[in-house]
Amino acid sequence: MANTTSGTVIFDKNFSIDEIIEEAYERIGFQGVSGYQLKTARRSLNILFQEWGNRGLHYWQIANNDITLVADQAVYTMFRSTGDGTSDATAVYGVDDILEAVYRNSSNVDTPLTKINRSTYQALSNKTSTGTPTQYYVQRFIDKVTITLYLTPGSSEAGNKLNYYYVKRIQDVGDYTNATDVPYRFVPCMASGLAFYLSQKYAPERVQAMKLYYEDELQRALAEDGSSSSAYITPKVYYPGT
């Protein structure tokens, strides 16, 4: 009689924080951890998620949002965390960067906007000119991300939308019974990364080995993460005398 399969694919969602911590400690030779060891591991896991923010774009953390434009307002603010002291019900939290944006009119017709840098924005002669926006400039501060439009929306643009894709921050670890804000592909490198961090505190003789495991698994996860699309390569034909 053939064995049956589980019929489920939810292991990553049932893999709680305390199990990740237990797995990481076992990799460096520790079992039955409790108290401060759990607390320091949870802190290290939060730091690991922040370090992933320096590892390139994570496609599962991309989201889309609209901002309603206001006449004569060029600067719009999004917050990097949920503890910024604002009570604005329309505020967007957990924003790390703006990837791309379009101006969307009342007929839901989109016009792409060009992302410019600080030098280009600074060189604009009249930053208060009003009209349909064509460019935007992003500033990333400690507590917030701002997007500055040029041209500044006028009365005829008020009520229309700025539609944009942004990079979200990975959610904090929180309670030990929580699941992580991470897709299943990153569970192996999350466990090995936490083991690497904990080895620096409790098993320095294993640091190098844990680092190699972590970097190897992280690179595989990053290579798999993404959005596939068709690519076409067309050779250029050269003719004599041209």
Image: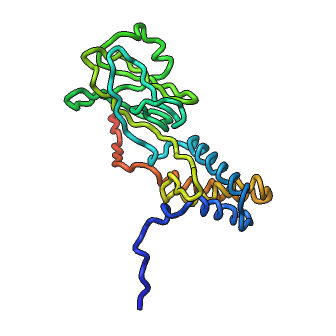
Q: How is the image coloured?
A: rainbow
Is 231 in front, or is 7?
A: 7
Query: How many numbered callouts?
Result: 0
Residue 100's spot in the image, x, y percent? Answer: 39, 33
User: Quadrant location of the N terminus?
Assistant: bottom left
- Residue at 35% in and 42% down: 235
- Residue at 42% in and 24% down: 76
Left or right of residue 48, residue 2 in this image? left
Residue 16's spot in the image, x, y percent? Answer: 55, 61
Q: Residue furthest right?
A: 205
Left or right of residue 62, residue 66 in this image? left
Residue 86's spot in the image, x, y percent? Answer: 49, 29
Residue 210's spot in the image, x, y percent? Answer: 70, 58
Residue 93 visible in the picture: yes
Task: Examine the rendered structure and indicate whether residue 71 appears above or below residue 180.
Answer: above
- Residue at 38% in and 22% down: 135
Is 166 in front, or is 217?
A: 166
Q: Residue furthest top?
A: 125
Task: Examine the rendered structure and indicate whether residue 213 appears above or below residue 123.
Answer: below
Q: Residue furthest front?
A: 87
- Residue at 44% in and 85% down: 3
Q: Quadrant of residue 112?
A: top left
Q: Residue furthest left?
A: 107
Residue 241 visible in the picture: no
Left or right of residue 31, residue 72 in this image? left
